[in-house]
Image (tube, rainbow, N blue to C red):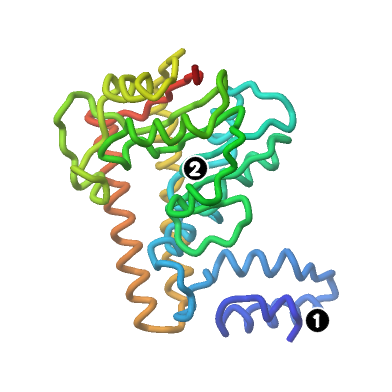
């Protein structure tokens, strides 16, 4: 079996690779090993018991795509990156970089020097850092721009996160904060945000106050709810693909864990979609400049 086949997750994927290669030889057409391996990796996610990655993250990538734990796309990332209007080789930080996809989007769409922070576990990319290591690994020289993708709402005190972001930016640096916002103060949507302290994001007025208190000047607020709902709707097909892939996992106990994680993911995003559709939650974009 070739080296490319050995990189595949699980016996079924390796056998499928061998079968495709034999069929290419039998039919007499060129066999692209790298392309075939990539296709099989997407169909059979790497989910061995020895992996230290949480099952929820493996399932998230199976649904939303490589490097993504939540809805997103290169066009979505670049939509906000263009708002920064930064020069070539600018230093940029991404808060909420998932499993690295937003960094890949910027790598292909810009020539910036970007690094990101993530809550994901056991990420090995050199330019992707854990928040737990932030104080030790962050370059204190400052960045010329920042993208924050759904990070304000994760903190019970958005002012604290805004202050952390401000400390990494140079005076005059541009920043774009994209986040969930409730329509009125005090709303609690625990089924939509079960892992968030106190159960819900803040209102747009509370976010503005937090950003202003952290030294940002607000320039513009945009409602991105419709475009984000379209991303969720487009991702529904990912559950079918993920189900097919997870059903091929050989370890029965692990397969059951992944199926439960996939069901929980589907329920979460169905709740969020309905909350946005009913107007209880919005997705807002805050364009700001650090004073």
Q: Position of residue 121 (x, y in %)?
A: 45, 61
Quarter residue 20 falls in: bottom right
Label 1: state its secondary structure.
Answer: helix
As measured in the structure, the alpha-carbon distance from the residue carrying label 1 to the one carrying label 2 is 40 Å
Q: Position of residue 186 (x, y in %)?
A: 14, 30
Label 2: state its secondary structure.
Answer: loop
Q: Relative to residue 48, is residue 262 depicted above or below?
A: above
Give me the residue at 43% from left, 22% from top. Answer: 286
Q: Is residue 286 left or right of residue 209?
A: right
Q: Relative to residue 43, is residue 136 depicted above or below?
A: above
Which label number is shown at residue 26? Answer: 1
User: Is the Cβ of the residue at disc 1 closer than 8 Å to that at disc 2?
Assistant: no
Quarter residue 140 falls in: top right
Residue of label 2: 72
- Label 1 or label 2, whichever comes before in sequence order: 1
Q: Relative to residue 189, is residue 252 depicted above or below?
A: below
Please tell me which residue lies in front, 52 or 182: 52
């Amino acid at each position: 079996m070739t080296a490319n086949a050995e990189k595949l997750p699980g016996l079924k994927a390796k056998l499928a690779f061998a079968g495709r290669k034999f069929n290419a030889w039998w039919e007499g057409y060129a066999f692209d090993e790298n392309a075939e391996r990539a296709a099989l990796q997407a169909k059979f996610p790497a989910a061995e018991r020895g992996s230290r990655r949480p099952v929820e993250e493996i399932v998230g990538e199976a649904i939303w795509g490589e490097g993504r734990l939540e809805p997103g796309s290169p066009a979505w990332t670049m939509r906000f990156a263009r708002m920064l209007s930064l020069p070539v080789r600018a230093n940029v930080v991404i808060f909420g970089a998932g499993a690295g996809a937003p960094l890949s989007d910027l790598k292909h769409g810009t020539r910036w020097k970007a690094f990101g922070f993530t809550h994901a576990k056991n990420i090995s990319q050199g330019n992707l850092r854990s928040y737990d290591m932030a104080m030790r690994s962050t370059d204190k020289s400052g960045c010329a721009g920042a993208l924050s993708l759904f990070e304000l709402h994760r903190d019970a005190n958005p002012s604290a996160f805004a202050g952390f972001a401000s400390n990494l930016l140079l005076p005059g640096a541009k920043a774009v904060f994209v986040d969930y916002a409730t329509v009125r103060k005090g709303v609690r949507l625990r089924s939509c945000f079960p892992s968030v302290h106190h159960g819900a994001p803040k209102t747009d007025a509370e976010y503005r106050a937090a950003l202003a208190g952290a030294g940002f000047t607000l320039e513009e607020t945009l409602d991105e709810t419709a475009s984000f709902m379209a991303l969720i709707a487009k991702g529904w097909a990912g559950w079918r693909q993920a189900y097919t892939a997870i059903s091929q996992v050989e370890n029965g106990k692990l397969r059951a864990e992944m199926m439960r994680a996939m069901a929980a993911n589907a329920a979460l995003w169905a709740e969020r979609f309905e909350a946005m559709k009913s107007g209880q939650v919005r997705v807002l974009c805050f364009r700001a400049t650090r004073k």
